[in-house]
């Protein structure tokens, strides 16, 4: 079996696209750089929407990116099972695209915050978290200005009941996210939105830890396990 | 509707109407400068020419007061092979080995940041990033050196929160890691906060680009943001005059930034470099189009013709003079061969960047600017860009300095802590002081992780970024200045800033290579300030010669004064070092239980200008610590030689050994058990700020090797204790402080100021 292809989308204003690509490469992926204005997923088996300020994000974060030609492809493929990880701005774009419920708003303290954050992985069955042990605590950077996750109580209750809160802040909530939510997934566990930045924690030379790497190895394991990869691939290129 | 047609002040009209009154004084032009312009042109300038000369001959752009002194940086330049491009370009370029070149520069944006802190600071970052980009480099990191007024003053929180949010907001959105800097509070900056932003960029040697327009028929392209009415006269009105409480509002002279556009500009420009589409390039910063056109033309080998009406505008009512003076941000100007223009435009389209051919390189010798069909500027470009006025401003040592230097902070006059309890309280008050407390309130608003190459960042002594993932080669940068030293003696003050920045780079294990400086002073029209400036430049030039680190470029900011009161001389020095393998860097973080703590360097009784004196008495008097650059070099080479043996290293500077030890404990959550050398009074051992010192930790097995290396290097090396597991700083015979007792005031201070 050939190496899985993981696409990283660059929007104008994406900043962590290089970091996400590096992380996927270190996890063993054949990385493909995707351009926002293109309409071809280039046969990618999974896609990462990286952090940054897509189109400047002077409006609601992710509100413009959602309408990009590449996102139309990503949304369609995600509905067919393509694993998608949205980190920070990518999470905001996933919410704006309605691939995930809820929204991300300005941090409650009104400042941008960058710090090393403790996080508990609460669901280790998704395409992007399956390499983590159960209820595992990690430390990875969080850095955002609009990282407060909000949704109505019914949605939050539903997410909790279905085990779709995949990660929660521990030891202090950095941005006022409801119920300390750091990341969620869709019903099938293929689309994950995460506010903290695992791509900045793949080695201890440049990151606080290497705790972020399993997000990227997880999708490789997921794609290499029977069936998933061909399905997603077929959905995209058909 | 009335149809008033504005008369275009053409070159022809200027020649035939020599006696028209011109508003040169309002534009900040002096009478003799106006006379000189008329002499150069052989006629009166047109209003557009007057606008260009006024901004380009401003203090900010022309360095007219500082030039005669800055020449020393060239005259005293040390012999070095490292300098690929020296002073005079947008930024200097240094060879860091393996075919890599690094360009770095620090620049001020002080005056705008007082009026409009967020935008002033944001566009300060934007401006320096474009300077680095214009050299052909990919910007890889930023740093900021900030000065604010008294922590207790009611206006301080406005300035701090705006400036920090501006530096962060712009840099974060560009995707550049902020890897360090300084933030200092002092009443002397109340009406004149300082924002000095540094950017560093990396490129291959062959990618160096210069600001020159050559090749007759080549096209001049303006690309990036549209031109608006913001920042008109920013350099002449704002940055070249003192603030005056009664003057009109200067807010319109502040530019407004759009970091997203700048991010596009970076990617777009790098793509053009990669495709070899650019013959010459210049960013538009202070003095806008006036600067870019005159500098490109002046550095080229022909003339240049510009069609000003082609400039895309944000505001269609702008006059040609305003278009020439506008400092709208996020614009660049490139010189492109006609055969490459389609490819150039394709790249701009890909990044949604507006690009317009506004002119061409001619075989003449003049810069000519047309407004539709009228010739409104016809000047030798060099007279605008380079041959501005040069002032030999009078300078003299102020008489009050003798009294200040004689006002030594003796123990009799200013009692010092003696007992263990007093020493303990002194340390706690320093830890909770505005200048030595945790900088986290500031640094947590900056992204230090983006790009994935940050190896060290605040609160480490220097920032380190990797420039090559395959070889692990990296660079280290530190920005430093203690302006109280400069207030005591500007010559020594500048050398002490250099000394500290050099040491901060050296303790990480990197090799210092070159420096950039940002010289912040009061009004050059005051002979005392001019003397301080002259002394600081002389000190820095002499210091750089001794250390072998050339000045690659920098910036001068004068008129930092409110009324008659100038800021302390603040020569901020940035030192760039190289480290061949970033994995071998030494950090404050490190050290294991049982490791031995060594104090490197020699401690003398040097209290004046230091943090303890500032916090305890706010006293400015006496002589600053002795400069010993030979000792700095010895310390640097020692650390480089033994870096594999060091489990951690931290420079000893502000607040002395006491603060260095406390910071080790706070950073590592371990304890230190310390025995101070018996021959020195405990207070001096703890709080003196003698130069060329560091604390390092080494495993017991490596102590002998490090001590032997120190002896060989001529560096005093004193074992002063060891790392313990009990999370406390224990100074034998003096005091013991639990880590949490220190952390509380240390962490609470800045948030309390900002609350």
Image (spheres, coloured by chain):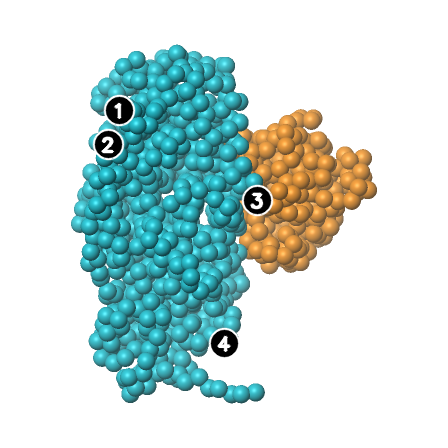
Disc 1 and disc 2: Cα gap in Å? 9 Å
Estimate how packed mark 3 is, as few (under 14), some (14 to 19) or many (20 or more) residues with alpha carbons within 10 Å: many
Q: Are marks 1 and 2 in contact (CB under 8 Å)?
A: yes
Residue under numbered circle 1: B604
Is residue A110 toward the left or the right of residue A206 in the image?
A: right
Q: Position of residue B488 (x, y in %)?
A: 27, 39
Chain identity of mark 4: B
Q: What is the C-alpha distance between the residues marked 4 and 1?
A: 65 Å
Q: Which residue is mark 2?
A: B626
Display colour for chain A? orange
At horizontal 51% and vertical 58% (from top left) the residue drawn is B258
Checking the image for residue B317, the label placed there is 4
Q: Residue at x 30, y 28 (%)?
A: B413
Question: Residue at left 41%, top 20%?
Answer: B422
Q: Residues within 10 Å of mark 4 (few under 14, many from 20)?
A: few
Label 3 close to label 4 by CB (< 8 Å):
no
| Drawn side of residue B368 relative to residue B728, left or right | left
């Amino acid at each position: 079996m050939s190496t899985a292809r993981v696409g990283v989308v660059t929007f104008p204003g994406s900043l962590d696209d290089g970091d996400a690509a590096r992380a996927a490469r270190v996890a063993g992926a054949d990385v493909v750089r995707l351009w926002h204005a293109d309409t071809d997923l280039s046969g990618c088996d999974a896609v990462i929407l990286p952090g940054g300020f897509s189109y400047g994000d002077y409006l609601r974060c992710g509100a413009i990116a959602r309408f990009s030609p590449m996102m139309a492809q990503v949304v369609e493929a995600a509905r067919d099972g393509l694993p998608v990880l949205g980190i920070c701005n990518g999470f905001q774009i996933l919410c704006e695209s309605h691939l995930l419920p809820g929204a991300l708003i300005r941090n409650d303290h009104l400042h941008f915050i960058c710090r090393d954050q403790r996080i508990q992985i609460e669901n280790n069955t998704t395409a992007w978290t399956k390499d983590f042990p159960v209820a595992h605590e990690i430390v990875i950077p969080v850095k955002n200005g609009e990282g407060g996750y909000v949704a109505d109580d019914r949605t939050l209750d539903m997410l909790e009941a279905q085990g779709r809160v995949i990660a929660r802040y521990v030891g202090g909530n950095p941005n006022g996210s409801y119920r300390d939510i750091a990341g969620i997934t869709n019903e099938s566990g293929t689309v994950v939105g995460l506010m903290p930045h695992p791509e900045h924690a793949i080695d201890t030379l440049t990151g606080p830890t290497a705790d972020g790497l399993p997000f990227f190895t997880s999708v490789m394991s997921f794609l290499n396990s029977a069936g998933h990869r061909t399905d997603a691939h077929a959905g995209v290129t058909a | 509707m009335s149809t008033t047609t504005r008369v275009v002040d053409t070159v022809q009209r200027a020649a035939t109407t020599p006696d028209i009154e011109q508003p040169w004084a309002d534009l900040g032009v002096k009478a003799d400068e106006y006379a000189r312009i008329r002499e150069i042109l052989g006629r009166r300038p047109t209003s557009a020419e007057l606008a260009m000369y006024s901004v380009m001959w401003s203090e900010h752009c022309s360095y007219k007061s500082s030039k005669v002194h800055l020449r020393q940086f060239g005259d005293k330049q040390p012999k070095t092979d490292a300098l690929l491009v020296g002073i005079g370009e947008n930024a200097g370029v240094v060879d860091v080995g393996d075919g890599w070149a690094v360009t770095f520069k620090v620049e001020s944006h002080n005056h705008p940041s007082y009026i409009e802190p967020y935008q002033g600071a944001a566009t300060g970052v934007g401006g320096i990033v474009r300077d680095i980009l214009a050299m052909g480099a990919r910007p890889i990191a930023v740093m900021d050196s900030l000065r604010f007024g008294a922590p207790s003053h009611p206006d301080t929180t406005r300035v701090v929160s705006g400036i920090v949010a501006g530096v962060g907001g712009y840099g974060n959105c560009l995707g550049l890691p902020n890897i360090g800097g300084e933030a200092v509070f002092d009443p002397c900056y109340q009406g004149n906060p300082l924002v000095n932003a540094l950017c560093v960029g990396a490129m291959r040697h062959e990618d160096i680009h210069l600001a020159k327009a050559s090749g007759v028929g080549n096209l001049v392209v303006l690309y990036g943001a549209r031109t608006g009415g913001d920042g008109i006269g920013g350099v002449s009105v704002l940055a070249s005059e003192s603030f005056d409480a009664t003057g009109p509002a200067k807010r319109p002279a502040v530019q407004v930034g759009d970091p997203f556009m700048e991010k596009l500009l970076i990617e777009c420009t790098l793509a053009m470099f990669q495709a070899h589409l650019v013959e010459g390039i210049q960013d538009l910063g202070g003095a806008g189009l006036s600067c870019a056109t005159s500098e490109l033309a002046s550095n080229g080998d022909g003339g240049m013709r510009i069609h000003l009406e082609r400039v895309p505008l944000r505001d269609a009512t702008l006059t040609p003079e305003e278009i020439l003076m506008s400092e709208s941000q996020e614009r660049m100007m490139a010189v492109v061969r006609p055969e490459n223009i389609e490819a150039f435009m394709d790249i701009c389209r890909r990044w949604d960047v507006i690009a317009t051919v506004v002119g061409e390189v001619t075989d003449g010798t003049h810069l000519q600017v047309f407004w539709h069909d009228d010739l409104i500027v016809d000047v030798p470009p060099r007279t605008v860009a380079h041959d501005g006025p040069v002032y030999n401003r009078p300078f003299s040592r102020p008489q009050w300095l003798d009294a200040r230097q004689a006002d030594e902070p003796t123990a009799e006059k200013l009692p010092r802590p003696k007992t263990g309890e007093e020493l303990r309280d002194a340390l706690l008050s320093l830890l909770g002081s505005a200048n030595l407390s945790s900088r986290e309130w500031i640094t947590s608003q900056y992204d230090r992780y983006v790009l994935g190459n940050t190896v060290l960042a605040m609160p480490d002594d220097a920032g380190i970024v990797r420039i090559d993932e395959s070889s692990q080669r990296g660079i280290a940068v530190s920005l430093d200045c203690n302006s109280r030293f400069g207030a005591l003696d500007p010559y020594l003050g500048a050398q002490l800033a250099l000394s500290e920045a050099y040491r901060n780079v050296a303790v990480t294990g990197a090799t210092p290579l070159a420096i950039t400086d940002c010289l912040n002073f009061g009004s050059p029209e005051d002979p005392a300030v001019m003397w301080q400036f002259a002394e600081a430049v002389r000190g820095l030039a002499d210091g750089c010669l001794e250390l072998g680190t050339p000045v690659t470029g920098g910036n001068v900011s004068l008129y930092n004064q409110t009324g008659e009161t100038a800021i302390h001389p603040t020569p901020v020095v940035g030192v760039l070092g190289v480290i061949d393998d970033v994995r071998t860097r030494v950090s404050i973080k490190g050290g294991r239980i049982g490791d031995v703590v060594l104090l490197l360097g020699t401690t003398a009784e040097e209290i004046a200008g230091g943090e303890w004196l500032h916090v305890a008495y706010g006293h400015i008097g006496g002589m600053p610590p002795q400069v010993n650059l030979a000792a700095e070099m010895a310390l640097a080479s020692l650390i480089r030689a033994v870096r594999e043996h060091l489990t951690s290293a931290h420079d000893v500077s502000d607040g002395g050994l006491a603060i260095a030890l406390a910071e080790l404990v706070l950073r590592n959550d371990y304890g230190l058990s310390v025995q101070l050398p018996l021959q020195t009074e405990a207070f001096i051992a703890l709080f003196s700020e003698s130069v060329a010192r560091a604390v390092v930790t080494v495993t017991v097995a490596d102590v002998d090797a490090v001590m032997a290396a120190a002896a060989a290097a001529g560096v005093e090396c004193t074992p002063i204790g060891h790392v313990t597991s009990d999370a406390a700083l224990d100074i034998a015979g003096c005091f013991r402080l639990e880590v949490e007792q220190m952390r509380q005031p240390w962490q609470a201070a800045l948030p309390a100021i900002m609350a």
